[in-house]
Amino acid sequence: MGRTGSPPVKSISSHRRRGTLEPIEADMSSPRHKLQIRTPVNPPAGQAFEQLAATLDAHGPVVLPALLLCDFGHLADGVERLEAAGAAALHLDVMDGRFVPQLTYGMVVVEAVRRATTRPIEVHLMVEEPESCVEAYAKAGADIVTVHVEGLTNPRRTLEQIASLGSRAHLAISPGTPVARIEPYLDVCDGVLVMSVEPGFGGQAFNPVALAKLSELAALRSQRGDGFRLAVDGGISTDTIGPVAAAGAELIVAGSAVIRTPDYARAISELEQLARSAA
Ligand code: DX5
Ligand code: ZN
C-alpha cells in the first residue's frame, strides 16, 4: 500500500456492496414491501475513502470533526452542516462505559450518520473487546474502523479482519502506551491514531507526548517503507494543530475546536490552513 498515489488496492470481492436495496423480509409481494426496504447507504464501499486519500495527497492534512459534542437531538442537521462546511471526513466516538467511563452511542447512530453523509466515516472504538464488534461497525458503514491496542488480545487478527470487511484498519494508542507496543503490527495498519488526550471525553487539554510519538512513527514508516497514515485525536486547537502536522499527522481529529464555534466552515478552514502550512 502506498502512502502517495493510489490507496491500498483491495479485491472487489472483499468490499461489501453498499447502496444496494436489501429487503428485510422475504415477502416482496406484500403491499407494504416498500416500507421494508432499508434506505440505501452511500457511497459504494471504498469510494469515499479514495476521495479522502486523494485530498491528503493533493493538499496535505485534513481535519476530521468529532461528533461527540454535537446536538444529538438534531444529528442529521449537524452532519449536514459539517459536510457543507467542507469536512473531509467525520470522526465518531463509540464509548462503552467500560473501556472508558462514558457511554456514547453504537451502530444504530453510526448507520444514521452513514445515511446522512457521503463523506468517509471513521469509527473510533473505545470499547472492551473491540474484536467482537468490528464487523457490525464495518457493516454499519464505517470507512475507517479504529481499534485501541490496549483493548485487543490479537491486534494483527483484528486489523486483518477489518481489512477483510472492506474498511480501513487503524490502530489507536493512548497517551501512556509506547509506540513499541504497536510496532509489530504496523505492516497491517492502514493508519495509526495517536491519542493526545486520555480517551473518554471531549474538550481536554492536549498532551504533548503525542508529538514525540508522531515523529517516531513517521521515522519508522520511512525506515520500513510502510504505507499507514498518521492520525491524531484530542485537544486540537489553533495552537496545537501546527505542531501535530509538523510531526507528521495527516488525519487530524478536532471536536471542540470545530463544534464549539458558531461557524464550522471557518473553523475547519482555519485549522487546515494552519496544518498545511506547518506540514
Ligand atoms: C476523546 C475522543 C475525541 C474527542 C475529541 O476520547 O476520542 O475524539 O471527541 O474532542 P476534542 O477535540 O475536544 O479534544
Ligand atoms: Zn476520538
Image: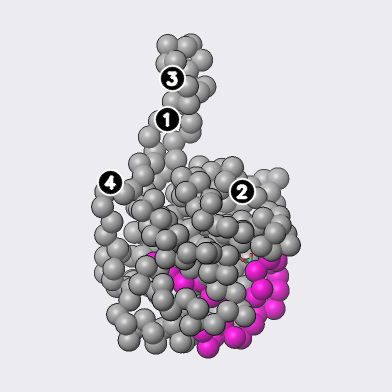
SS state under label 2? loop
Is there CB contact under 8 Å for labels 3 and 1?
no
In the picture of the structure, the residue carrying the numbered disc 1 is 22
- Given residues 31 and 261, the one toward you in this image is 31
Residue at (48% x, 11% y) in the render: 31
Tell me how far mark 4 sits from mark 3, CA to CA: 24 Å
- Given residues 134 and 66, the one toward you in this image is 134
Q: Is residue 152 visible?
A: yes
Left or right of 220 on screen, residue 242? right
> How many marks do you count on the picture?
4
Residue at (42% x, 43% y) in the render: 42
Residue 256, percent from left and from top: 67, 67
User: Image quadrant for the N terminus?
Assistant: bottom left
User: Image quadrant for the C terminus?
Assistant: bottom left
Is there CB contact under 8 Å for labels 2 and 3?
no
Task: Pick whichever of labels 2 and 4 is earlier in the sequence.
Answer: 4
- Three-letter amino acid code at the position of disc 3: Ala
Task: Pick whichever of labels 1 and 2 is earlier in the sequence.
Answer: 1
Is there CB contact under 8 Å for labels 1 and 2?
no
In the picture of the structure, the residue carrying the numbered disc 2 is 106
Tell me how far mark 2 sits from mark 4, CA to CA: 27 Å
In the picture of the structure, the residue carrying the numbered disc 3 is 26
- The magenta stretch is 190-214
- Does the magenta run of residues contain 208? yes
Front position among marks 3 and 1: 3
- Three-letter amino acid code at the position of disc 4: Ser
- Three-letter amino acid code at the position of disc 1: Glu
- Given residues 215 and 160, the one toward you in this image is 160
Tell me how far mark 1 sits from mark 2, CA to CA: 21 Å
SS state under label 1? loop
Looking at the image, which residue sits at the far right?
Answer: 101
